[in-house]
Image (tube, grey):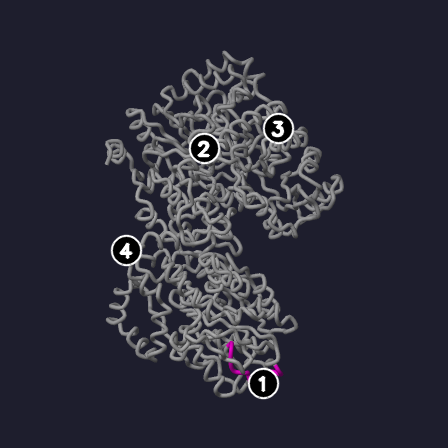
Amino acid sequence: MTELEARLRAVVRGDVGFDVTSRALTTMDASNYRRVPVGVVAPRDADDVAAVLAVCREREVPVVARGAGTSIAGQATGTGVVLDFTRHMNRLVSLDAEGRTAVVQPGLVLDRLQEAAAPHGLRFGPDPSTHSRCTLGGMIGNNSCGSHSVAWGTTADSVRELDVVTARGERLRLGQDWAGAPDGLRALAEAELARLRTGFPELPRRISGYALDALLPERGADVARSFCGSEGTLGVLTEAVVRLVEAPRARALAVLGYADESAAAEAAAGLLPFGPLTVEGMAADLVPSPQALPRGGAWLFVETGGESAGEARARAEAIVRAADVLDALVVTDPAGQRALWRVREDASGTATRMPDGTEAWPGWEDCAVPPARLGAYLRDFRALMAAHGLRGTPYGHFGDGCIHVRIDFDLLTRPGVARFRRFSEELAELVVAHGGSLSGEHGDGQARAELLPRMYGAEMVGLFERAKGVWDPDDLLNPGMLVRPAPLDAGLRFSVLPREPVDVAFGYPTDGGDFSAAVRRCVGVAKCRTTSVSGSGVMCPSFRATGAEEHSTRGRARLLHEMLAGEVVTDGWRSVEVRDALDLCLSCKGCRSDCPVGVDMATYKAEFLHQHYAGRRRPAAHHSMGRLPVWLRAVSRTRTARLVNALSSVRPFARAAKRLGGIAPERDIPRVARRTFSRWWERRRAGGGVGDAAGGGEPARRGSGGAGQGRLVVLWPDTFTEHLSPAVGQAAVRVLEAAGLRVALPPTVRLAKPPVGDGRTVALDPLTLLRGRGRVCCGLTYVSTGQLDRARAVMRRTLDLMEPVLETDAPVVVLEPSCAAALRTDVPELLHDDPRAARLAARVLTFAETLERHAPGWTPPRVDRPVAGQTHCHQHAVLGDAADRRLREAALLTGELSGGCCGLAGNFGFEKGHWEVSTACAEDRLLPSVRDAQDGTVVLADGFSCRTQLEQLAGVRGRHLAEVLAEALDEDPVRDGADEDPVRGADGNPTRDGA
């Protein structure tokens, strides 16, 4: 322990972290820059802040205040002590609805304030796209704005009073009429009144530099307002009194389509006289799927408010009539508006990839010009990018003249960095020529502070330096920002990464096979740090359970970045810090879809575990659960399921087994089916029932009117369906055949490419008898535990078995969503050198997709009941659930399934040490949705893990959609296939209700 750390621990009641993980997590924000701190402190109150400042002042150690770390100019990083306000100083102290004010701590997330104000018909005006994780302290530090600034202004417009601790320990209450001004500030301002009146451009989004003009007497000598946007360089905020505004009772969203972004930009200023709440713009390059938008190549999102939906809509329609548009859409449905706004809010992440996959970076993210000049500025801006051979897609707050853009700078090579500097210098001149501000929202930080003399001139920048000296004469607070800045091309976060591709197992196809490029995907926008998810969203369940940065997708990506850099995390793939952070990753794959830049932490975790344990002893759980298919097949071959179930129900035996297997003692061991799905299938065939195995056995279809002549589908007997819940497989067969499809199972011997399912040719590979029989397997359990060599061997054997299927056009129906996701993604990404893997992935369909595509004329039975439960996280992230929604609707299964993750997540929830997080994840969305369900509700859970979690935590049996439909078929007066076996439970016993 260093002397500094020891002293801080002695005087601070909050958390003090000088360890590798704490430092690695705060080396970066959402910018291009990286600075390594000596330590991190999470203060509990203003006294802690003062204590930290005193200790650091004595030792001349810089201090940097940090909120959510979503700043894009580098101002939330530092080489000294970083103050993290999100852990403890994150409360809403009070809310005065009558006075329309709130008292907040700096670590309070904006959405929490909005939730508290909403019942009173109030809200905080500014709302950046990061509203679900940005903090009030960070917003005040950057003078943030958001999409509603045309109506409610910047954060500075919403600040009344600020409690601040200066670097020398003085506690000030900042306000108007020089309230709280440090000694010397008033004299400095009053000596420069002429400069303050003439030296600042008049535009709504001028954020650059210090807001010293707020100290003018005609502007109320507002010290609190002048403090906004100071980026933590003048004092440390500990509490704020902020103004709230009245929220419209109803809103409408007019989406206006234009030919291109310049046309949209030219039109934006003309809409302001109509008093809109927003005038946001974006182009088609940033929209993954524009079907929901009106015709055009660029759009303005113009929101209107009113006392009623009719009034809001009328205002929106008036704007549409006045606008010269190609096409327009007016949306009053709140859900529809939210879906459209998500497209706009995700642009900050989506913009980090060009349409061809090329990386793009911040740095010139939010310049602002007078709104009337925006069209002309954009044309000049495009021309400048073209002159430098650069690309970017502008979007942002067109009504305020503020443009966001990420540009495909090459920040990895010396010539690329040199071009970045030249472009930055020329763009600064262009912005100034249009009467604009280098920063219109996110602050100057390191990205633009060096260029402030081009905007303000040397004398005004000199005044900024003198103001900094009044507040912080020791230059203790966030040095290198705003005044005496670090060079804009120094300390780039990419410079520490390996220049050659790292040897890895996965193919990383969207990152050119480069693991470093995959890790670079995380740009720090921190959507994974949200404390709640809406709709079917998933990311990031472990962060919501723990609230710890290292258990967010961003935190893990930062640790992997530092692992590759080798400066803070020094032991590479052997790092225990990275291992521990990844340990609570559920591999839910939620980030693969919910992260705007597509970070895939489940894959990174599997890669890390593979490398970390190479040649080393693995945890017991990797053997017990990672090799689950092996153990279950052994039980099946020896026909000992009854014995295994009996022993697992005896407490001493179960306790010993769980201890040996690394299984959480709180968990019950699932029961193994006495008869596997495949045995049921074979018995059914032997008895003359419907069924086939791909490569043999012509089905003798009975009872459903000629399905034997229908489209052949190959039903995948995944490990869970095969050994733990064969009732799901049986139900799926019933429904697929009722829909007129012909069902077969994959081959169990390697065939010499016969026609699949013809019942006549079973030509064997000459070595078949030596190889023996086998079963297809997606390798999921091996992937999730990082046993990638074994996973590849299993996958190759599977491809060998599936070759005759791949010679046909038969779809592969997979009932377990996690296995379907593995076949769609993990198999082709691990076997990127085997073309059969991509062919198999392209064949994989879910149960609902199969019915929709290959039995389009079939009408499912009417269930006519409400549903509850959860969309499987892998289905949400990889497969999509649109077909499932349509199938449920057709069966009159009403209601929505929740998002999130069940928390069991395959092996995760069974592993020792994961019980608390696993149950917390279940309590996030799944269990409340089931508890709140009305009587008669069908609890749907297509995943075995989800069903197990429901049974073990809530005593509720969830059912696969196939089971629900099969049960409804049974209840039909004219039963289809009445002579067949009844659907059986996991233990092999008949069940009629599936519950």
Q: Nearer the viewer, mark 2 or mark 4?
A: 4
Provide the secondary structure element on which disc 2 rests.
loop
Determine which residue is flagged by label 4.
Answer: 616
Name which residue type carries label 3: Val
Determine contact: label 2, label 1, CB under 8 Å.
no
Q: Between residues 822 and 336, which one lies in front from this camera angle?
A: 822
Point 41% across, 49% down: residue: 543
Residue 1 visible in the snapshot: yes
Compared across the picture, whether 645 is left or right of 687 comes to left
User: Neighbour class for label 4 at 10 Å: few (<14), some, many (≥20)?
Assistant: few
Provide the secondary structure element on which disc 3 rests.
loop
Q: CA distance from mark 2 to mark 4?
A: 39 Å
Q: Earlier in the sequence, mark 4 or mark 3?
A: 3
Q: Which residues are magenta?
A: 694-706
Determine which residue is flagged by label 2.
Answer: 74
Determine which residue is flagged by label 1.
Answer: 703
Q: Earlier in the sequence, mark 1 or mark 4?
A: 4
Determine contact: label 1, label 4, CB under 8 Å.
no
Provide the secondary structure element on which disc 4 rests.
loop
User: Neighbour class for label 1 at 10 Å: few (<14), some, many (≥20)?
Assistant: some
Name which residue type carries label 2: Gly
Residue 978 spot, x, y in % from top left: 54, 85
Residue 518 spot, x, y in % from top left: 46, 47
Q: CA distance from mark 2 to mark 3?
A: 22 Å
